[in-house]
Image (cartoon, grey):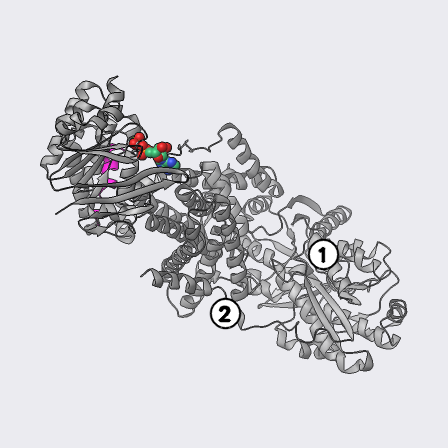
């Protein structure tokens, strides 16, 4: 009887491990080979895991596509590090990648992780190309090996405000952010620009990162009856419960979010409550040959997230520059990278002196469970 | 045959030899007194019997069953209950609850039955309540059923401890200094009560300092000194035993 | 006024959930003086069991109440067994050891279970079929969703059931007796190991129910969902007076209310800070918590 109880206990606890044993990680496979080692940095666990894994998978897809072209320089391998979107863990991961002799790091996701991690990396002359951190400061610190493939929040907030005033004809807005470098930076920008554009800010509230209960804030929003509710949250997993609760509380207003919530997970979690939500996001033409090539390589990782294509392009850009330079020597690669110009999966890639590659924000809307292009701030017209 | 049998019990606490080769029996119908000066090891004997302490050597048997490997609640289920020298009631419970909890091992219904208030559970609760009230009545505590244990007078708490032990439906009861702190009138009542318990067919082993109580009701006496049994026999024999007089009575009387 | 009432409703909902989780901490602490760090993970396991069961049942076309009811019963049962297993393997062998070793064991269990959930269930959020329970009604100007009704209803039901169990049944008396004096309760015939095991099971069952309702309410669960509510529920237990069941219920409700009202009247970003300030303040003036009592440590 006692035995049986112990056995049962062990079995119950074992139920927590067995199912996990089947899937092995790819990373151990071709370690210790010479060639080019690329690091990826992003939250692989925790609430932003989906986005961090998108970055990692984008790099993997790019490596697969580029490997045959690298010749004697290859093979290219990936070392994926988890920063959990935590500044300290990001610095530790960066130092680990330095020790492991990575020559470029694709990442990170949260601007608040990217900025501190870039310090040791750039000092060690390792390229850091972020596919996701949109905070302006990322490229405004005069760091020679810091690049950015996605857009910038100052541009993003301009597009957001323009959409609210020109297309939605909004007179006022209620703003909420969750206090990260990214989300608060963006929200502050919008608040600043709103004044100039004749948009009244009815309130600007902060919630905590990872909160799931927004009932208090939403009660205020409901009472304020804004024309637009500007929701600046760090990712889709935080935004989904927000949308569910907005619907549940019967708040009827336009909702505008941004690039960080762009992820198929948003519709998975919030389902029909995500319908009609607007968001600012970098324009991507999904019909180009380069996008299709990326989509084919990425297929096995599931549906691309917000930064999959940017991550893919960042990796491709670096490897193209290495190939042109014929070595991984940082000076030579940088010279090639500055010359480089190509049609990426996400957009036309051309890095500027400060490391940015330009923004091309448009407004998308969630329609029938899909992100769909909606309005173009350049032309002020709806997409067809 | 509900016989409690201790054979050559020894107990050590680190360097202290608390009991050395203690052997005696409590037979059917017995009222046995266990006496000795403070620190002689009397409470330790109780703790060994009830499974609170492990013996270093020797064996306790109850009805022939060795108790060594049994945990306290199993020993109780065999029919050995006890009270404490320093009262250990469940202070946050009422008198009735204190007694009801002692029926735990005599009842069956599981958690689900209890939460769902199944009829079988209700019937059982009712039966427990009836028996517990009887136990309280037996100890003249009926009117205090709803009183919190911590609010009861000292003498009543002593009686409640005995009521609780009786509620476990024991065949043998161990009373550790039941008269301690009682006034003479209460002591007399207690002697009377112990007699009535014995009449219920329950065997009694009691530790007591009050010689009037011991000599008055015990039919057999065991004397401990520094963990060693120095005498055993009928009250009148013990009173005459020179070693007892020297070790214990002598001290007291001088 | 409208705002106040709306926050009151929200606070009760949130507080009820904290209360359910807090009970597990307080009951286990009451009985073996252990802060069971793994309790938050049991809550998460309940949330996951719920999403697995409800998704499946709902996909089979069962009506919402059947899905919810069956999932609640099964997940509570599973988590009860899981908690008993944890107790048997990680805590019981250390019963005679120092409190610190058991505490470390609990910490280890927490990490083990969280990582186990991550390995088996993945790092992504897992969606509940929120379409199962939708909508709500307006009571005057206050919006009450059906989901809130369910949470409050189930919580109230469980709290009543717990009170009946603890104060009206033989098992409850045995639990209270064991909490007060383990040796003495063994000496009146209570199998303390069984009762301890049972206490873990009951606490886990309540946590599992909370996990499911939170999953349904917010729409998703994640492997690390147990951490923050775990800390808050533990604070609620301390606030109410650790070891005290009524205290845990009160503490849970209070923390929920404080959080919602602080977010409503001060600012959302300071709601946690505020909850902890109240906690510290209460403990400063009432070191044993609101309902706490000084239980003296009687030994044999
Ligand atoms: N748990 C224990 N640890 C160490 N020493 C103990 C313990 N219990 C009893 N003793 C010692 O054993 C001796 C006998 O104690 P006890 O049986 O309580 O005596 P009494 O005859 O007065 O009831 C005493 O010296 C006491 O200090
Ligand atoms: Mg004694």
Task: Measure the alpha-carbon separation of dots 2 and 1.
Answer: 30 Å
Q: Residue at x 41, y 49 (%)?
A: C149
- Taking depth in this image into account, of B31 and A334 the one nearest to the observer is B31
The residue under label 2 is A19
Percent x, y of residue B206: 21, 33
The spot of residue C73 in percent (x, y) is: 36, 58
First to last magenta residue range: B94-107
> Label 2 is found on which chain of the structure?
A
Tag 1 subunit = A
* Residue A307 seen in render: no
Residue B44 shown left or right of residue C148 in the figure: left
**Camera-nearest residue between B231 and A234:** B231
Q: Quadrant of ligand 1?
A: top left
Can you give x and y, in whole percent of width and height, for residue A178 in the image?
Answer: 65, 50
**Residue C133: quarter of image:** bottom left
Which residue position is annotated with label 1?
A92
Question: Residue B98: within the magenta?
Answer: yes
């Amino acid at each position: 009887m006692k035995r049986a109880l112990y056995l049962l206990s062990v079995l119950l606890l074992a139920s927590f491990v067995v199912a996990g044993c089947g899937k092995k990680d790819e990373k151990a496979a071709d370690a210790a080979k010479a060639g080019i080692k690329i690091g990826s940095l992003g939250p692989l666990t925790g609430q932003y895991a989906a986005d961090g894994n998108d970055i990692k998978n984008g790099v993997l897809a790019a490596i697969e596509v580029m490997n045959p072209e690298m010749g004697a320089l290859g093979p290219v391998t990936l070392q994926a590090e988890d920063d959990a979107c935590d500044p300290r863990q990001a610095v530790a991961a960066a130092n680990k990648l330095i020790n492991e002799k990575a020559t470029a790091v694709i990442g990170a996701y949260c601007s608040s992780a990217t900025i501190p991690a870039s310090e040791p990396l750039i000092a060690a002359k390792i390229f850091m190309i972020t596919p996701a951190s949109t905070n302006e400061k990322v490229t405004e610190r005069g760091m020679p090996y810091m690049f950015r493939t996605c857009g910038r929040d100052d541009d993003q907030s301009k597009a957001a405000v323009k959409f609210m005033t020109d297309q939605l004809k909004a007179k006022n807005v209620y703003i909420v952010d969750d206090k990260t470098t990214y989300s608060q930076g963006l929200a502050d920008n919008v608040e600043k620009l709103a004044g100039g554009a004749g948009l009244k800010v009815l309130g600007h509230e902060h919630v905590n990162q990872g909160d799931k209960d927004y009932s208090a804030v939403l009660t205020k929003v409901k009472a304020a009856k804004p024309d637009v509710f500007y929701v600046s949250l760090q990712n889709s997993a935080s935004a989904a419960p927000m949308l569910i609760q907005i619907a549940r509380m019967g708040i009827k207003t336009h909702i505008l979010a941004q690039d960080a919530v762009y992820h198929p997970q948003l519709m998975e979690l919030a389902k029909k409550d995500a319908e009609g939500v607007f968001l600012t996001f970098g324009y991507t033409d999904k019909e180009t040959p380069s996008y299709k090539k990326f989509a084919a390589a990425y297929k096995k990782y599931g549906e691309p997230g917000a930064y999959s294509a940017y991550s893919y392009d960042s990796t491709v850009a670096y490897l193209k520059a290495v190939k042109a330079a014929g070595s991984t020597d940082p000076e030579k690669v940088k010279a090639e990278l500055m010359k480089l110009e190509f049609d990426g999966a996400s957009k036309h890639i051309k890095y500027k002196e400060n490391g940015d590659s330009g923004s091309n924000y448009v407004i998308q809307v969630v329609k029938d469970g899909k992100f769909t292009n909606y309005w173009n701030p350049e032309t002020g017209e709806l997409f067809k | 045959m509900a016989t409690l049998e201790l054979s050559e019990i020894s107990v050590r606490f680190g360097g202290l030899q608390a009991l050395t080769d203690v052997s005696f029996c409590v037979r059917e119908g017995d009222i046995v007194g266990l006496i000795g000066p403070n620190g002689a090891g009397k409470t330790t004997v109780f703790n060994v019997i009830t499974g609170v302490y492990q013996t270093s050597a020797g064996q306790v048997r109850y009805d022939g069953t060795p108790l060594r490997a049994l945990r306290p609640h199993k020993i109780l289920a065999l029919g050995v209950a006890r009270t404490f020298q320093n009262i250990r009631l469940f202070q946050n419970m009422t008198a009735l609850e204190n007694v009801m909890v002692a029926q735990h091992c005599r009842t069956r219904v599981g958690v689900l039955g209890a939460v769902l208030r199944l009829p079988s559970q209700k019937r059982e609760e009712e039966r427990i309540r009836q028996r517990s009230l009887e136990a309280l009545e037996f100890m003249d505590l009926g009117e205090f059923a709803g009183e919190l244990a911590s609010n009861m007078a000292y003498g009543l708490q002593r009686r409640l401890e005995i009521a609780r032990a009786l509620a476990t439906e024991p065949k043998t009861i161990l009373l550790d200094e039941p008269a301690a702190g009682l006034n003479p009138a209460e002591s007399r009542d207690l002697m009377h009560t112990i007699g009535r318990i014995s009449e219920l067919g329950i065997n009694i082993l009691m530790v007591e300092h009050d010689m009037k109580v011991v000599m008055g009701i015990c039919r057999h006496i065991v004397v401990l000194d520094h963990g060693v049994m120095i005498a055993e026999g009928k009250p009148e024999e013990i009173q005459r035993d020179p070693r007892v007089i020297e070790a214990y009575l002598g001290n007291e009387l001088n | 006024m409208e705002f106040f009432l709306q926050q009151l409703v929200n606070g009760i909902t949130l507080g009820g959930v904290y209360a359910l989780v807090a009970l597990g901490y307080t009951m286990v602490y009451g009985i073996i003086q252990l802060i069971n760090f793994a309790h938050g993970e049991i809550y998460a396991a309940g949330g996951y069991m719920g999403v697995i069961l409800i998704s499946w049942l709902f996909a089979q076309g069962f009506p919402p109440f059947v899905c919810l009811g069956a999932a609640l019963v099964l997940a509570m049962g599973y988590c009860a067994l899981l908690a008993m297993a944890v107790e048997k393997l990680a805590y019981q062998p250390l019963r005679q050891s120092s409190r610190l070793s058991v505490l470390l064991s609990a910490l280890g269990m927490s990490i083990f279970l969280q990582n186990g959930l991550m390995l088996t269930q993945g790092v992504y959020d897992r969606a509940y079929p929120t379409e199962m329970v939708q909508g709500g009604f307006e009571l005057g100007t206050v919006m009450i969703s059906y989901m809130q009704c369910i949470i409050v209803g189930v919580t109230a039901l469980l709290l009543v059931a717990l009170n009946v169990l603890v104060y009206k049944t033989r098992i409850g008396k045995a639990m209270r007796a064991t909490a007060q004096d383990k040796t003495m309760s063994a000496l009146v015939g209570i199998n303390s190991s069984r009762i301890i095991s049972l206490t873990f099971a009951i606490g886990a069952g309540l946590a599992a129910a909370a996990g499911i309702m939170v999953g349904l309410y917010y729409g998703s669960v994640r492997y690390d969902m147990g951490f923050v509510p775990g800390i808050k529920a533990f604070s609620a237990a301390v606030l109410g007076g650790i070891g005290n069941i009524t205290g845990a219920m009160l503490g849970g409700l209070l923390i929920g209310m404080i959080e919602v009202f602080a977010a409503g009247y001060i600012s959302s970003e300071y709601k946690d800070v505020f909850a902890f300030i109240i906690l510290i303040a209460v403990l400063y003036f009432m070191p044993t918590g609101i309902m706490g009592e000084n239980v003296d440590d009687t030994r044999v």
